[in-house]
Amino acid sequence: MGVGLKLGKGGGDVGGEKAKMGFEETELRLGLPGNIRAGEGEVARKRGFSETVDLKLNLSSKESSGVDPNEKEKNLLPCATDPAKPPAKAQVVGWPPVRSFRKNMFATQKSSSEESEKGGAGNAAFVKVSMDGAPYLRKVDLRMYKTYLELSDALAKMFSSFTIGNCGSQGVKDFMNESKLMDLLNGSDYVPTYEDKDGDWMLVGDVPWDMFVESCKRLRIMKGTEAIGLAPRAMEKCKNRS
Amino acid sequence: MNYFPDEVLEHVFDFISSHKDRNSVSLVCKSWYKIERFSRQRVFIGNCYSISPDRLIARFPGLKSLTLKGKPHFADFNLVPHDWGGFLDPWIRALAKSRIGLEELRLKRMVVSDESLELLSKSFLNFKSLVLVSCEGFTTDGIAAIAANCRFLRELDLQENEVDDHRGHWLSCFPESCTSLVSLNFACLKGEINLGALERLVVRSPNLKSLRLNRAVPLDTLQKILMRAPQVVDLGTGSYVHDPSSEVYNKLKSAFQRCKSIRSLSGFLEVAPRCMSAIYPICTNLTFLNLSYAPGLHGNELTKLIQHCRKLQRLWILDCIGDKGLGVVASTCKELQELRVFPSDPYGAGNAAVTEEGLVLISAGCTKLNSLLYFCQQMTNAALITVAKNCPNFIRFRLCILDPIKPDAVTNQPLDEGFGAIVQSCKGLKRLSLSGLLTDQVFLYIGMYAEQLEMLSIAFAGDSDKGMLYVLNGCKKLRKLEIRDCPFGNAALLEDVGKYETMRSLWMSSCEVTLGGCKTLAEKMPSLSVEIINDTDQMEFSLDDRQKVEKMYLYRTLVGHREDAPEFVWIL
């Protein structure tokens, strides 16, 4: 199909001769830009224009053919990695032809998702933590921790003063003894629970950590006796203790 | 002609609905002209400056539905300064003063003010339908006026408008008595929404068939809405993010199962890929799927979704689907007629993930394809020739290679032969957009073969005036021609000045046309308006005729030069 199309096929207004002319001139022009054609005023003018276009698109003559496309894209638009910033000067106005509405949508979408990707979800996830019997609540940023164990340690440290107080006699010695603290929190009357996005109270530890962080709205360290009806595991814990 | 009483002719004309046919009918004779103009209810004005509101009202006293388009197409790509024109206000004021019972208004690329919207809402008792596409200049206060005052409102459709969002109370402005809504689309609004008001509105709108939400509507509200409106046919989700193991998500799944009528789906402005399985039940009947604003959906989740959509006729997608993903589309969507692949990085910095391979796969699998918009990394002549062979039914073919002068990726030749094959094979082609390295040759082909072509968009192409001349001489049905950064000059512009009277408009920017050439054209053709648009930061406009014109926009008009042109527009 290719070659047959070019010469003298149909085309009323165009006319055979004109078509031929067009083809010849096209043939000439298939050379790489930068080649000088002496004595062809028209061609020389065309060069001038294409040089302007090349400048506009920030291409050097070397790059306009046969180069790895990835490479070329990078050279073409060096600074456009962050669409939230105004486009770099190297970009051509109005190209690619995408509606401004769409461009703006993507600028906001990208910057908000970039925010949440920074440092393991840059948005902090502060939740209130209450402990039954404690006179006041605390707040923790769940995104500071990577596992339930880490969270548990942190909570233990936070509420150590209250547990010591409740347990009574041992005082400062127990406070210094971390493992005893853990026992207090894990083994004794206390059951860690949380309120999720649906408003239900759940037992901490059932779902994968990431899912927990996404859905946890607040934490409550319940006294075992209060945890009746919460979850079978919690119930069992209470039974085992008593 | 006059053998029938007028009433009979009127009745016959009732069956003629296409604008083109109606226009033809009115040209037959005076009597037909008269009968036609009194019975015409729907008028389409493709360029708001081609006619004046007064003449419209005088000719069509029975006008009920008006479509108006303002700025030229290249305004979409920031090539037209903001205050260029396209104001709705004079139209609304004139219509409001008249006895026209306007019921429907459809606008594209117009500047719409809150005052206009308020006047509109108060002037036409039976106003039913407002559709705004790519408009600007208004806020949610204007929308609130429409909601509050249009008692029989059926349709409020806002598509991709730049709206200043004053946050949320506009929804509450729909009175309790408003129960007539059929279509509500506010996806382009950026602000918060009164969710309770939205739910109550849906509950009292039993005829609601089309609902497109914005980002501020969360998934649990969507679930509640769907429970109350299972009859919906066209749905645009808002934020589609939730924990797939939650109760809300389960309820959403059952809600979708009850929605047996959904044929069109869009939105997913924020999306949690793991929540897509709720949608599978409605995928089987979908005919239109728009995921072009959902960059969060790609890879396996995306292809899994597509594989459920066997009846799809129109698909709008992002290029992160990749060539392989397009292969899945090709093997699944055998009914596909329209495909749009948008760049996931619209600033063109990154690499588009689709190439000529994806397009070839689509053409092989989806032989009913007739409309294409394809942003891609690269293209080859061989691929285009194959596509032309596989899909001879293209009506719209728009190809955008991200690097605008990229040659054939394999042979390094210009893409003339490929596009030539497209125009030769697709005899019904009406709209064409070119890109890639192109010489005058491609225009020779277009002039020779594109007999039905009505709109042509050219950028960074051609070698000389011959290119433009081939098109102007060959394409008899050409209506809109838009050219940027091409070496076409005065010789091409002035060879056949009468041609422009047969077209709606011509746009040329960053070409070789000079001020002198434009002046000559304006002198010869008083029925044209020749506008020179100077970007504001250009130095004072020198009167040297040899100076090249940065932006020229000309259009035919029955009412002479417009009077609302800003300072930077010079009408010759």
Image (cartoon, coloured by chain):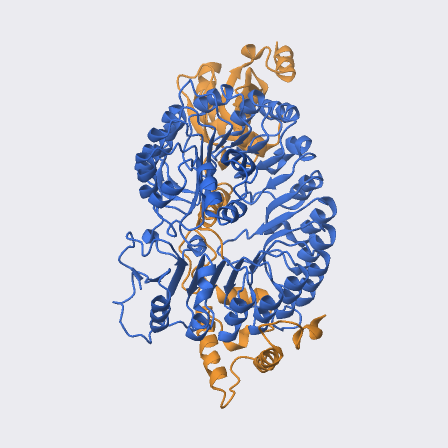
Instruction: Tell me if residue B82 can be seen.
Output: yes
Q: How many labels sit on residues?
A: 0
Q: Is residue B405 visible?
A: no
- Specify the farthest residue to the bottom: A39
**Residue B237 placed where, x, y %?**
54, 33
Name the residue at 44% across, 66% down.
Answer: B498
Residue A123 percent location from the top left of the image: 45, 38
Q: Is residue B179 above or below residue B427?
A: above
- Foreground pick, A197 / A39: A39
Closer to the camera in the image, B460 or B116: B116
A38 to the left or right of B168 = right
Relative placement, left or right, of B348 versus B301 is left
For the point 31% across and 39% down, which residue is it?
B94
Q: Looking at the picture, tell me which residue is in the foreground, B457 or B12.
A: B12
Can you give x and y, in whole percent of width and height, for residue B292 in the image? Answer: 56, 45
In the rendered structure, the answer to whether residue A119 lies left or right of residue A19 reads: left
Q: Eyeballing the image, is B472 above or below B138?
A: below
Foreground pick, B169 / A81: B169
Where residue B62 sits, quadrant-wise, is: top left
Which residue extends farthest front?
B3
Q: Residue at x 66, y 77 (%)?
A: A7
Q: Indicate the colour of chain A.
A: orange
Q: Is residue A99 above or below residue B157?
A: below
Residue at 57%, 17% in the rendered image: A188
Task: Say above or below: A30 vs A202.
Answer: below
Which percent across, then down, holds residue B72? 42, 54
- Which quarter shows the C terminus of chain B? bottom left
Report which colour depicts chain B.
Answer: blue
